[in-house]
Image: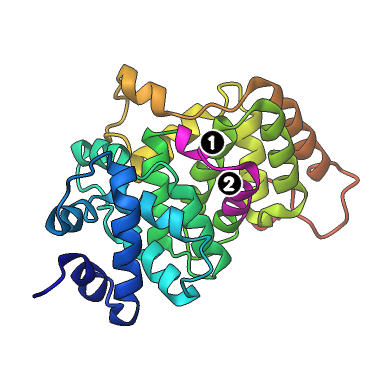
């Protein structure tokens, strides 16, 4: 007789060599995660196809020494596979509501393993845009390392990286936001992103207009020139803490100073210079 729990890991994850130990861990953990002590193995298999439950389950397994690195990577990647990217504005809300609470811990693990892809970043961006507490559901070290991995990922478009940085900075406590931004501007972010990020932070509207434009381009908000945002959309748009504006202005003033080293183009200047 086929064990439905073992089948989840052997077939869905294509990890037959780890299926027995993973099925055993699922039997031990799922009753606590779901609050149900009466689930049959079939019920548990169905629950493991729920992104929130599976992602939470994976988060509990990542620190365990009895599970190998390749199995952990497969588990974390499958947690993202269960999160569909939205195809319409209505789907965006589903992504936000179905993301596991510690999604960023899974993304951080994949980043540390060198397995974070553009698709993973897009999943995190969509989820965080509608569920900002996802950022603070993980510890400061985890969320900061993930942010640095995202902004350094050249395969991901610069607007996406900028929007994620804005979401992060707008979500954490102000003192942490200041330290994080300073770290990015001093060297934690690629040079091409530093000037744009400083400009967003220094903007009078807290960068809202530029971040709204990116969110519309990426399908996070309904497009349409001049279209006013609904109250729920406005709540989703990140705004930089006002006290960070001075840091952005100082950085821009320093790099655009006439005393800067020769051969460097001021931030924002384009053209041949003729």
Q: Quadrant of the N terminus?
A: bottom left
Q: Residue shown at 61%/21% (left/top)?
A: 204
Can see residue 77? yes
Q: Is residue 147 magenta?
A: yes
Q: Is residue 64 above or below residue 250?
A: below
Q: Nearer the viewer, residue 72 or 169?
A: 72
Q: Quadrant of residue 229?
A: top left
Q: Position of residue 95 (x, y in %)?
A: 28, 43
Q: Residue shown at 77%/39% (left/top)?
A: 251
SS at circle 2: helix
Q: CA gap, disc 2 to disc 1?
A: 8 Å
Q: Is residue 251 above or below residue 155?
A: above
Few, some or many residues within 10 Å of mark 2 (<14, 14–19, 20+): many
Say whether disc 2 or disc 1 marks the residue closer to the N-terminus.
1
What residue did someone put label 2 on?
Answer: 143
SS at circle 1: helix
Q: Residue shown at 63%/42% (left/top)?
A: 140
Q: Position of residue 268 (x, y in %)?
A: 65, 44
Q: Quadrant of residue 258?
A: top right
Our reading of the magenta stretch's main secondary structure is: helix
In the image, the segment drawn in magenta is 133-148
Q: Is residue 160 magenta?
A: no
Q: Quadrant of the C terminus?
A: bottom right
In the picture, measured across the screen, residue 72 lies left or right of residue 38, that is right
Q: Quadrant of residue 214?
A: top left
What residue did someone put label 1 on?
Answer: 136
Q: Are marks 2 and 1 in contact (CB under 8 Å)?
A: yes
Can see residue 269? no
Q: Position of residue 21 (x, y in %)?
A: 35, 71
């Amino acid at each position: 007789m086929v064990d439905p729990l073992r089948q989840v890991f052997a077939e869905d994850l294509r990890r037959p060599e780890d299926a027995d130990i993973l099925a055993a861990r699922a039997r031990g953990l799922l009753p606590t995660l779901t609050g149900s002590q009466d689930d049959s193995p079939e019920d548990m298999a169905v629950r493991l196809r729920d992104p929130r439950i599976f992602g939470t389950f994976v988060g509990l397994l990542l620190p365990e020494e009895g599970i190998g690195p390749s199995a952990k990577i497969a588990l974390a990647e499958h947690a993202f596979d269960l999160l569909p990217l939205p195809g319409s504005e209505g789907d965006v809300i589903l992504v936000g509501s179905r993301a596991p609470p510690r999604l960023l811990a899974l993304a951080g693990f994949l980043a540390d393993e060198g397995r974070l892809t553009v698709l993973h970043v897009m999943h995190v961006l969509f989820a965080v845009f509608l569920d900002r507490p996802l950022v603070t559901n993980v510890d400061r070290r985890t969320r900061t390392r993930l942010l640095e991995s995202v902004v350094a990922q050249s395969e991901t478009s610069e607007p996406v990286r900028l929007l994620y940085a804005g979401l992060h900075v707008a979500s954490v406590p102000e003192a942490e936001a200041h330290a994080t931004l300073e770290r990015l501007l001093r060297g934690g972010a690629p040079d091409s992103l530093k000037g744009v990020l400083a400009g967003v932070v220094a903007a009078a509207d807290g960068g809202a207009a530029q971040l709204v434009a990116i969110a519309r381009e990426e399908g996070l908000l309904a497009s349409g020139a001049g279209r006013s945002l609904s109250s729920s959309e406005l709540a989703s748009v990140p705004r930089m803490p006002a006290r960070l504006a001075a840091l952005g202005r100082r950085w821009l003033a320093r790099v655009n100073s006439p005393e800067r080293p020769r051969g460097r183009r001021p931030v924002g200047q384009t053209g041949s210079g003729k």
